[in-house]
Amino acid sequence: MDLFLIKLFVVINVLSVGVLFYLLRLSRKRYSLLKRMEAMRNRIARDLHDDIGATLSSISFYCEAITRRIHANKIDEGLKVLDKMGVQSREMIENMNDIVWMVNPKNDKMDRLFERLEDYGKSLFTSQGINFIFYADPQLLSSTFAMDIRKDFYLLCKEALNNAAKYAQCSTVELLIKKKGKELITIIRDDGMGFVLNEDTSGNGLLNMQVRANHIGGKLVIDTKSGQGTAISFVSSYPPNW
């Protein structure tokens, strides 16, 4: 009987230690998640502050410029400044809509992300007479992205699409998102004029995409040649180790 009690005591202690380690590990994961969410909230707050502050400052500057031109009876120049003010205001509204969409937990699943990317691409290119092709691997539809990952992934793709619309002078743009083995592969390519990749072309757009790729833990590759179009590839692990 004494031997049985000793064995029972040992088993209970082993189980207690196991449960303790499990709870400790769970607590560390929860703490890590909370820290990650806090960092994301702070980043969103900074983005909102910077976007709104910069836009309001610009609008104030534009208003002063318009007033000076009206007083100088330069109405046409004033109208041009007013157009610029309208463009910047609409860009701020679009950025605000993006942020509101990203923080909504209803949009965690990748099918919602793909739907938004497809709608954005169609809206962007149809008005310019550019054919837009979108493909998302059906295997990915039920997957989920954390809020901060969804933000960087969406904005990376959006930046690449915008660059194609502004500079490529193309007839077709493709956005392909697929799973291959243990990799998630995203490709944005066009049949446009291409460009020579050097320091002069590494402006904020390309730099921002690289920074976002690094945040997600993936690799960004830009393949372009003058007159032969551009392909931007983003490769990360799958399931995502984010």
Image (spheres, helix red, strand yellow):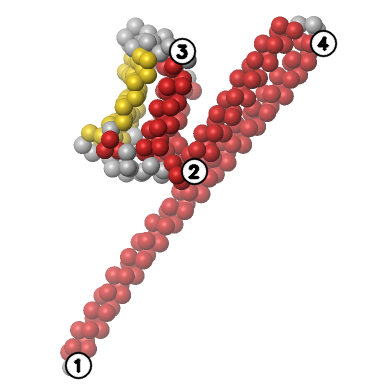
Indicate whether 138 appears above or below 230: below
From the viewer's perspective, tell me whether residue 241 is left or right of residue 3: right
Q: CA distance from mark 1 to mark 3?
A: 86 Å
Q: Which label number is shown at residue 104? A: 2
Indicate whether 14 appears above or below 28: below
Residue that sits furthest to the bottom in the current view = 1
Indicate whether 97 appears above or below 31: above
From the viewer's perspective, tell me whether residue 211 is left or right of residue 175: right
Q: Which residue is mark 1?
A: 2
Q: Which residue is mark 4?
A: 71
Q: Which residue is mark 3?
A: 128
Q: CA distance from mark 4 to mark 3?
A: 37 Å
- Where disc 1 sits, the SS reads helix
From the viewer's perspective, tell me whether residue 121 is left or right of residue 1: right
| Label whose residue precedes the other's in the sequence (4 or 3) | 4
| Label whose residue precedes the other's in the sequence (1 or 3) | 1
Q: Quadrant of residue 135?
A: top left
State which quarter of the image contains the N terminus.
Answer: bottom left
- Where disc 4 sits, the SS reads helix
The type of residue carrying mark 3 is: Gln
Which residue does the image show at 17% across and 89% down from the upper left? 3
The type of residue carrying mark 2 is: Asn
The type of residue carrying mark 4 is: His
Q: Quadrant of residue 13?
A: bottom left
Nearer to us: label 2 or label 4? 2
| Label whose residue precedes the other's in the sequence (2 or 4) | 4
The type of residue carrying mark 1 is: Asp
Q: CA distance from mark 1 to mark 2?
A: 59 Å
Q: Position of residue 103 (x, y in %)?
A: 50, 42
Q: Position of residue 98 (x, y in %)?
A: 51, 34
Which residue does the image show at 21% across and 37% down from the upper left? 181
